[in-house]
Amino acid sequence: MTISKALTIAGSDSGGGAGIQADLKTFQELGAYGMSAITAVTAQNTLGVHGVYPVSIEGIVQQIDAIGEDLGTDALKTGMLFSGEVIEAVSERIHHYGWENIVVDPVMIAKGGAKLLQDEAIRALKEKLLPLTSVITPNIPEAEVLTEMKISSLDDRRKAAKQLMGMGAKAVVIKGGHADDKEVIDLFFDGTTCEELMSPRIETLHTHGTGCTFSAAITAQLANGMTMRDAVLTAKEFIRAAIEDGLGIGGGHGPTNHWAYNKRGEK
Ligand SMILES: Nc1ncnc2c1ncn2[C@@H]1O[C@H](COP(=O)(O)OP(=O)(O)OP(=O)(O)O)[C@@H](O)[C@H]1O
Ligand SMILES: Cc1ncc(COP(=O)(O)O)c(N)n1
């Protein structure tokens, strides 16, 4: 039996809805063996981020090396990287191991407004990480920061996706969760085709960690050997089920249901 392996380099969310916790749950549900390198520990719940405790560069590099020198990985994703220094160190290690299937979720601000990436880090993200990226998955505000353009229309999203490809990413998904369209439109662009992936907008407060879960599902499916397009299509179904069958726990923005996609398949 071949084991698909997936690595997440991201922050820890004590509340379990976002960050490495969401990633590992998603990897497990999609049949990939999950591994992690933690970049920062957050004290967090559905009400917000109450504290951020960055891990030292040495500590992050040692975690990545522990995996690189022994287990290896078939795909990896990055989430909360927090600083330019972390981005540089992580990019250098990815390059060193020659890893492929690199999914970059450019996490900048938590739903509750807490800053998860320092401003000075944007340059490192563009210069060091984007050239190694197989797919980048910004939400609309993140795509605006990276491209320095205002994104209002669907056409703006297409232009932004092209610009991000020009910066080195091999594919782009601009997620539509933050737009006010009736349907949620995630724009997928791989250099040749530009596709609008539509699904009904679900009226719910419980969308904590949707971006983490979506990018983790892409990572797991790339580790499983799927093409980029198929991995993105599965991730869209995975997150749709996870939001639709929300758990309704916590007093604020609750987590999604990482069991939902497989539970539906069992029926
Ligand atoms: N209300 C919703 N109904 C249906 N799908 C949604 C909804 N909100 C988000 N999604 C889906 O979830 C995924 C993540 O989108 P979103 O734009 O919320 O990312 P994000 O802001 O990075 O998420 P987060 O920061 O919460 O982790 C996308 O595939 C999007 O289509
Ligand atoms: C450790 C960590 N990583 C990512 C997010 C983004 O998720 P959200 O925007 O839903 O708060 C988060 N809140 N915490």
Image: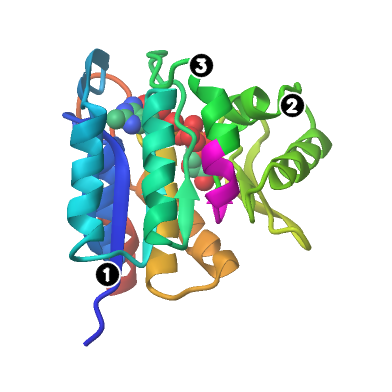
Give whichever of 203, 235 is nearer the camera: 235
Q: What residue is drawn where x is 47% and y is 40%? A: 105
Residue 155 pos. (x, y %): 83, 38
Q: Is mark 3 within 8 Å of ligand 2?
A: no
Q: Secondary structure at mark 3?
A: loop
Dot 2 alpha-carbon crowd within 10 angstroms: few under 14, some 14 to 19, many 20 or more: some
Is 132 inside the magenta-drawn segment? Answer: yes
Of all residues, the one furthest to the bottom in this rendering is: 1
Disc 1: which residue? 31
Describe residue 74's horizontal placement relative to residue 173 as left or right: left
**Residue 43, percent from left and from top:** 18, 20
Q: Earlier in the sequence, mark 2 or mark 1?
A: 1
Which of the four quarters of the rendered structure image does ligand 2 lie in?
A: top left
> In which quadrant is the N terminus drawn?
bottom left
Check disc 2 and give the amino acid type.
Answer: Ile
As measured in the structure, the alpha-carbon distance from the residue carrying label 2 to the one carrying label 1 is: 36 Å
Q: Which mark is residue 120?
A: 3
**Vertical position of residue 6 compared to residue 212: above or below:** below
Under circle 2, the secondary element is: loop
Image spot of residue 216 (x, y percent):
38, 52
Is ligand 1 within 8 Å of the beta carbon of the residue shown at mark 2?
A: no
Q: Position of residue 92 (x, y in %)?
A: 41, 44
Residue placed under numbered mark 2 in the picture: 151
What segment is highlighted magenta in the picture? 128-135
Label 3 sits on what residue type?
A: Glu
Q: Is residue 258 visible?
A: no
The quarter of the displayed image where residue 148 is located: top right
